[in-house]
Amino acid sequence: MSRPRIITKIVESKWQGEGRGARVRRSIGRQELRNLDPFLMLDEFAGNGAEGAGFPDHPHRGFETVSYLLEGHFIHEDFTGRKGFLYPGDLQWMTAGRGIMHSEMPGNEPTRGLQLWVNLKSTDKMVEPEYQELVSNDIPIAEKNGVKVKVIAGESFGVKSEVRTRTPTYYLDFELAENSEETVQEVPEGWTTFVYVLEGKVDFSGKTVKAHHTAVFGGGDCIKFSNADTGTSRFVMISGEPIGEPIVQHGPFVMNTEEEIEQAITDYQRGQNGFEKVRTWRSDHGNK
């Protein structure tokens, strides 16, 4: 017997400034939705880089960033010399591990996307940085009864993603046609699960969630949903296995103890233990 999950909290995300002249709607990571283990942050970001707005050179340690572009294009650079572009539907799953310094800058046209921060267990926090990058056409899609889903991570409708997740994670982008049928998505028991509605309105077992709202679910092994709008609705479902370890965060550093945070700050300031290239590297687009 399936046990559909019930919504326990709904929170609206409103625009706020972030980075250098950029705007985000913060979901996970705001006061009401802190450290939803294993997730640290989810932002819907928007803007363009015409006036230098974006997310210029900044460091990370101890977790992963997942960038998923919805509109426009995005320019990514890091201190290893890596440089790339994301276009609508493209994905970058970056394991910051022991240290990365990068910039993320929108193109000149209107740009919109999502960035998720996924925590790493203590044994993975100091791994070497790693990337998984997929263009839109490489992300598998499944369709059923008027529901289309891009399987970014995990599994849906029998379709599996090839993305490797150090912290076991589902990341599914659902698009619901106006007359689509009620749908059931299985979710592993005990995993932290939430949705963020991008467009329209969606009904989850009797509770309606509007665009730019986050809904957090209680226990169960699936979610049931249907379109509650007169047009197309769209949402992402994100679910992950809790790590269950202490979380100590200082801006872009996320570790398990205060001592480890102090060490991360010292390493960054001194350019050591993974941050050696910080001393000499400057991005092209982040410093315009």
Image: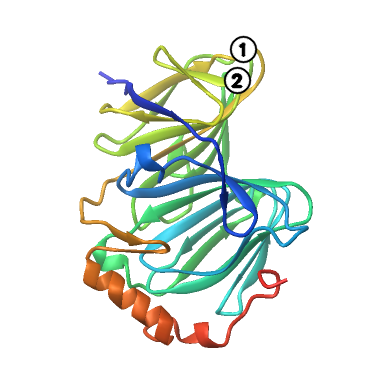
- Quadrant placement of the N terminus: top left
Where is 153 relative to 166, above or below? above
Disc 1 target residue:
179
At label 2, which amino acid type do we have? Answer: Gly
Which of the numbered marks, if any, corresponds to residue 160?
A: none
Residue 54 point in image, percent of width and height: 64, 58
Disc 2 target residue:
146
Q: Secondary structure at mark 1?
A: loop
Identify which residue, 74 or 268, lies in the foreground. 268
Residue 100 point in image, percent of width and height: 47, 73
Residue 188 point in image, percent of width and height: 30, 36
Residue 14 point in image, percent of width and height: 54, 36
Instruction: Give the spatial CA distance, label 1 vs label 2.
Output: 7 Å
Where is 276 relative to 202, above or below? below
Badge 1: residue crowd in 10 Å (few <14, some 14–19, many ≥20): some
- The residue positioned 73% from the left and 49% from the top of the image is 72
Badge 2: residue crowd in 10 Å (few <14, some 14–19, many ≥20): some
Res. 221 in view: yes
- The residue positioned 22% from the left and 65% from the top of the image is 257
At label 1, which amino acid type do we have? Answer: Asn
Q: Are marks 1 and 2 in contact (CB under 8 Å)?
A: yes
Q: Secondary structure at mark 2?
A: loop
Q: Is residue 86 left or right of residue 226?
A: right
- The residue positioned 22% from the left and 72% from the top of the image is 259
Where is 84 relative to 141, above or below? below
- The residue positioned 52% from the left and 87% from the top of the image is 279
